[in-house]
Image: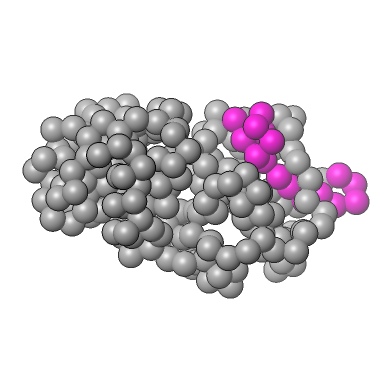
């Protein structure tokens, strides 16, 4: 199968849970290293990330193609447990992938692009991503914020290297003002204007983010995912 045929197969299987893989396939942002309709997929993204998915039948064919060391977005419990238990990948909390399939929101006001000068501040207030990931977002005009009248950052958000929405943080003094919702709407609009899927990964324990996704109309995938790594 070529990548378009693989994308069609995956879309029919579950277009929400595998939205990240579909985006990368359709935009030709990497190479398929292994694919089996029965077993799963290993996709090496141009940014160095691996997408690994099992399709719920058997991972026997898939296992020999899993890198011994990498940063991976792993879709499916069988292969994730194998990687963390047998290959010593970091044990991490699973996420659900959420996808927005609606129209653009009306223009969201008061959102500004943040440049690299904001990276140290963001790193101090957001620990889930690396400085390289955040700096890459700034360099690609994919880092946004809202500032008060004195120019202080109240909230920020952006895109991770592989294209998912995230980095969304509202500083404590400015919470419950709707800033997070406005920033995510802006991220959604940006993704749609760039011809990409608007999707994000949300930890199962993050009830506030889950509520936000539901409020904005994002749909939850059925397959759990894990961001795991081994150095």
User: In which quarter of the view is residue 116 placed?
Assistant: top right
Along the line of sight, which residue is nearer the eye, 205 or 190?
190
Query: Looking at the image, which residue is at 77% across and 59% down?
Result: 108
Along the line of sight, which residue is nearer the eye, 218 or 155?
218
On the rendered image, what quadrant is the N terminus found in?
A: top left
Query: Looking at the image, which residue is at 16% across and 47% down?
Result: 39
Residue 130 is situated, as x and y percent measured from the top left of the image, at 52, 34
User: In which quarter of the view is residue 50 placed?
Assistant: top left
Query: Looking at the image, which residue is at 66% across and 29% down?
Result: 139
Q: From this view, report whether residue 61 is shown above or below residue 168.
A: above
Residue 41 is situated, as x and y percent measured from the top left of the image, at 25, 42
Relative placement, left or right, of 185 versus 40 is right
Q: Is residue 29 magenta?
A: no
Residue 197 is situated, as x and y percent measured from the top left of the image, at 52, 51
Residue 150 is situated, as x and y percent measured from the top left of the image, at 90, 47
Q: Can residue 106 be seen in this view?
A: yes
Relative placement, left or right, of 1 versus 24 is left
Relative placement, left or right, of 52 versus 81 is right
Q: From this view, report whether residue 191 is shown above or below residue 219.
A: above
Q: Is residue 209 visible?
A: no
Query: Looking at the image, which residue is at 54% across and 33% down?
Result: 133
Along the line of sight, which residue is nearer the eye, 140 or 156?
140
Residue that extends furthest to the right in the rendered view of this protein: 149
On the rendered image, what quadrant is the C terminus found in?
A: top left
Looking at the rendering, the stretch of residues picked out in magenta corresponds to: 136-151
């Amino acid at each position: 199968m070529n990548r378009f045929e693989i994308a069609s197969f995956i879309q029919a299987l579950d277009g929400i849970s595998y939205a990240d893989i579909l985006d990368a396939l359709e935009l030709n942002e990497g190479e398929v290293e292994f694919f089996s309709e029965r077993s799963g997929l290993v996709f090496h993204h141009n940014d160095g990330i691996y997408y690994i998915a099992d399709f719920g039948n058997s991972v026997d064919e898939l296992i020999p193609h899993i890198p011994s060391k990498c940063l991976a977005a792993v879709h499916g419990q069988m292969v994730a447990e194998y990687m963390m238990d047998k290959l010593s990948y970091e044990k991490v909390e699973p996420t659900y992938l959420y996808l927005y399939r609606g129209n653009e929101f009306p223009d969201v006001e008061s959102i500004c692009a943040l440049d690299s000068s904001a990276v140290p501040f963001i790193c101090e207030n957001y620990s889930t991503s690396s400085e390289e990931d955040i700096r890459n977002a700034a360099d690609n005009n994919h880092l946004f914020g809202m500032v008060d009248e004195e120019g202080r950052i109240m909230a920020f958000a952006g895109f991770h290297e592989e294209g998912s929405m995230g980095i969304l943080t509202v500083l404590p003094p400015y919470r419950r003002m709707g800033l997070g919702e406005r920033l995510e709407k802006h991220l959604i609009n940006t993704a749609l204007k760039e011809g990409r899927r608007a999707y994000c990964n949300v930890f199962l324990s993050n009830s506030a983010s889950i509520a936000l996704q539901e409020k904005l109309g994002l749909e939850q995938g059925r397959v759990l995912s894990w961001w795991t790594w081994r150095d």
